[in-house]
Image (tube, rainbow, N blue to C red):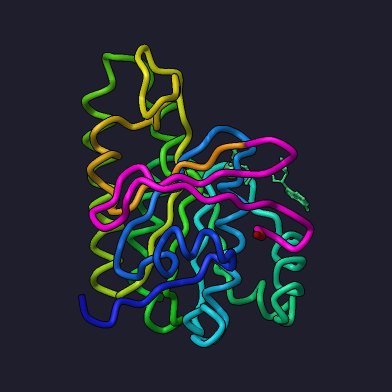
Amino acid sequence: RKNIEYISTGVKSLDDLLEGGIEVGSLTELIGEFGAGKTQLCHQLSVIVQLPKEKGGLGARALYIDTEGTFRPERIIQIARARGLEPEKALENIIYARAYNSDHQMLLVDEAKKYIEKNNIRLIVVDSLINHFRSEYPGRENLASRQQKLNRHISQLHKLASLYNLAVVVTNQVMAAPDVFFGNPLRPAGGNIMAHGFTYRIWLRKAKEGKRIARIIDSPKHAEKEAAFAISEDGVTD
Ligand code: ATP
Ligand code: MG
């Protein structure tokens, strides 16, 4: 393993859990129920990637593909302030794109090739990866075509990650499962296509007193461990 780069999460416990942070060149999936902190962490990473290496970033920009309309510039401003960045600059360094349907989402990823290098983009966020696919291809009868398309989308992201040496972070919802998955009656949406599509899968959940727990559920290099974190005015914190 030579010279793997990481983007710090900005949270000591999470960086320790991940043995450095979010890995560049790979796809990482943040899984969790509503309010678990997936979008908050995506905001935070979009700021931290901008920091210099010695502060956990890559001195680079982020591309933020928002499929749910939950990107909040004012949140970026708060997180940037807390990290000592000029808020307006931090916002400018996040290239924002709203994806209106799954075709548009895939087009945005395809078109990103034209400007990734020129703009020094080293992080692509897709929040969330799957919601358009789920709503456009409902039910059993559409499952095969949905999964096929989702697979193509994940391949697109893999190509960008390795071609441009950048980190891809996506979010995914959980759904009720008929059986128990990792001690939980919920499981990540998207089935095997998602399970095999991502190098690292991190499950976030709400715990007592506003705390959050992150658990690595799928990784070639990490043990199945957990770490606690919190969400505050300043962003995601220890
Ligand atoms: P969804 O599946 O609905 O998209 P999510 O996992 O993306 O959920 P987030 O939007 O990341 O969830 O988390 C929302 C939670 O973050 C809020 O419920 C709140 O607890 C916390 N939060 C957001 N902003 C702040 C803030 N300024 N101060 C403290 N906590 C905050
Ligand atoms: Mg969200």
Q: What stretch of residues is rendered in magenta?
A: 207-236
In the image, what residue occupies the spot 26% across and 14% down?
A: 141
In the image, what residue occupies the spot 35% across and 14% down?
A: 179
**91 or 185, nearer to the observer:** 185
Q: Position of residue 231 (x, y in %)?
A: 70, 52
Image: 125 above or below 122: above
Quadrant showing the N terminus: bottom left
Q: Is residue 153 left or right of residue 54?
A: left
Q: Looking at the image, in which quadrant does ligand 2 appear?
A: top right
Q: Position of residue 116 (x, y in %)?
A: 39, 75
Image: 108 above or below 139: below
Residue 108 appears in which quarter of the rendering? bottom left
Q: Is residue 63 left or right of residue 154?
A: right
Q: Position of residue 30 (x, y in %)?
A: 46, 47
**228 or 73, nearer to the observer:** 228
Reply yes or no: does residue 92 show up in magenta: no
Q: Is residue 221 left or right of residue 172?
A: left
Quadrant showing the C terminus: bottom right
In the image, what residue occupies the spot 46% across and 42% down?
A: 203
Q: Position of residue 189 (x, y in %)?
A: 39, 30
